[in-house]
Image: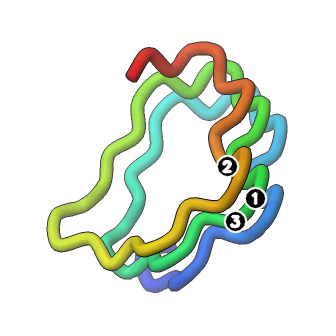
């Protein structure tokens, strides 16, 4: 995923075993529902000098373990 420009719509939908993710600096967009219902996801790290310009609706909705 390190060279990806986009995390696609629903790409990790309901991936309940996913606990931590690092968004590479090359990613410019996170699609709708990309991480929706990842109930164990508790940490998201964005690499320095991030190119991220868009996080679409509900990208992290229902990620009940996220605190911030």
Q: From the viewer's perspective, is 47 left or right of 22?
A: left
Task: Name the residue tied to disc 3.
Answer: 31
Q: x and y percent of residue 55 in the render?
A: 56, 61
Q: Is residue 34 above or below residue 7?
A: above
Mark 3 Cα shell of 10 Å, populated few (<14), some (14-19), many (≥20): some
Label 2–label 1 contact, CB within 8 A: yes
Q: x and y percent of residue 49 in the render?
A: 17, 72
**Alpha carbon of mark 1 to alpha carbon of mark 3: how far?**
4 Å
| Quadrant holding the C terminus | top left
Q: Nearer the viewer, residue 66 or 17?
A: 66
**Alpha carbon of mark 2 to alpha carbon of mark 1: how far?**
5 Å
Label 1–label 3 contact, CB within 8 A: yes
Q: From the viewer's perspective, is 64 left or right of 13?
A: left
Q: Secondary structure at mark 2?
A: loop
Task: Name the residue tied to disc 2.
Answer: 59
Q: x and y percent of residue 36 in the render?
A: 76, 39
């Amino acid at each position: 995923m390190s060279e990806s420009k986009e995390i696609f719509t629903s790409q990790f939908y309901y991936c309940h075993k996913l606990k931590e993710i690092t968004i590479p600096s090359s990613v410019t967009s996170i699609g709708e529902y990309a991480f929706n219902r990842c109930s164990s996801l508790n940490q998201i790290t964005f690499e320095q000098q991030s190119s991220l310009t868009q996080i679409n609706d509900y990208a992290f909705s229902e990620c009940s373990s996220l605190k911030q």
